[in-house]
Amino acid sequence: MIKIAEVMSPQPSALWRMVKQCGVDHVVGGFPHTRRDGDPADIHPDERPWSFPNIVRAKTAYENGGFELNVIEARPPLDKAKLGLSDRDEEIEYAMDLIRTMGAIGIETWCYEWMPILNWTRTSTTTPSRGGAYVTGFDNELMKGAPPAEHQVTEEELWDNLKYFLEKVLPVAEEAGVKLAMHPDDPPLSPLRGMGRIMRSVDNYQKLVDLVPSPMNGICMCQGNFALMTDQLPEVIRHFHDKIYFVHMRDVRGTPEKFVETFHDDGQTDMYECMKAYRDIGFEGVLRPDHVPTMEGDDNDHPGYSAIGRLFAIGYIKGLRESVYKQGAA
């Protein structure tokens, strides 16, 4: 059965207790906060956020809180690798260090992405939604006048740089037993401020898994982004059945050029059919809710990650899972 998780900092908090009270036992983790900032090359290897001692401490903290750490969704610096700069091998070695550590302590999946310089991009974090909740939104018309990013890279260069990266890290991942789950571009649109972006279509995801064939080369099925790539999401889930290593369950309304995020029960995707697809392909990995609305009684300091919105999402997904899996067992 698919596992429901939440993404939380390694520092214990009230959110930990609320999530545990909702019956969630799995966690998607990040790096612990450290006392050292700056160029990783100037920091002792044991003091880097992704170092073995720091990841062990994070894993222990989650376990002490009653959670199993299944996925790490934080990344060492990778922009030089994405841009193909002359000193990219140093960053690639950071990624390999993380993968080796994960394998050594039994963390099975690393969620990474290939968006250079610009990551998650929105033009609004206060779009009104149901009942006055706030959601995030994107309108590319508002981005067209933005200055170009400091660095420029073409889609062809991104593919070349990705292949170079995968050829380096996948042998390490295979030896460590760690799966690499590629997160889509968010939004799945190219170019953005002059930067090429490649993880933005179903066809490009097929190209990814074919680029460097490996049992560790796979997909983070972030449903909000994939819903902007296709109107046949359950079929796409079935198509990539053995390459889906991690799931973000969220929803949107719109197109890659202009969309808003939604409550999990209020978007353009048939969430029930998606859950059936995961059941049908035998996916037993981790799913977490993502990008929830900011609801009454919560603040909007971290748009998309309101505590109350998360609790609604967890309850909705748990009910969906129970309905689908009981039907399958009948």
Image (cartoon, rainbow, N blue to C red):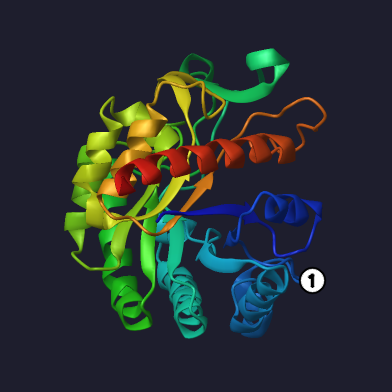
Kindly identify the residue that appears in the image at 46 percent across and 37 percent down: 186
Q: Quadrant of the C terminus?
A: top left
Visible residue check, residue 189 = no
Residue 327 image offset from top left, x and y in percent: 34, 41
- Give the answer, above or below, for where 102 lies relative to 234: below
Closer-to-camera residue (249/188)? 249
Residue 7 image offset from top left, x and y in percent: 61, 53
How packed mark 1 is, by other alpha carbons closer than 10 Å (few <14, some 14-19, many 20 or more), is: few
Closer-to-camera residue (87/68)? 68
Residue 301 image offset from top left, x and y in percent: 77, 36
Kindly identify the residue that appears in the image at 80 percent across and 32 percent down: 299
In the picture, measured across the screen, residue 236 lies left or right of residue 85, that is: left
In the picture, measured across the screen, residue 329 lies left or right of residue 142, that is: left
Q: Quadrant of residue 303?
A: top right
Label 1: state its secondary structure: loop
- Give the answer, above or below, for where 26 lies relative to 93: above
Q: Which residue is mark 1?
A: 35
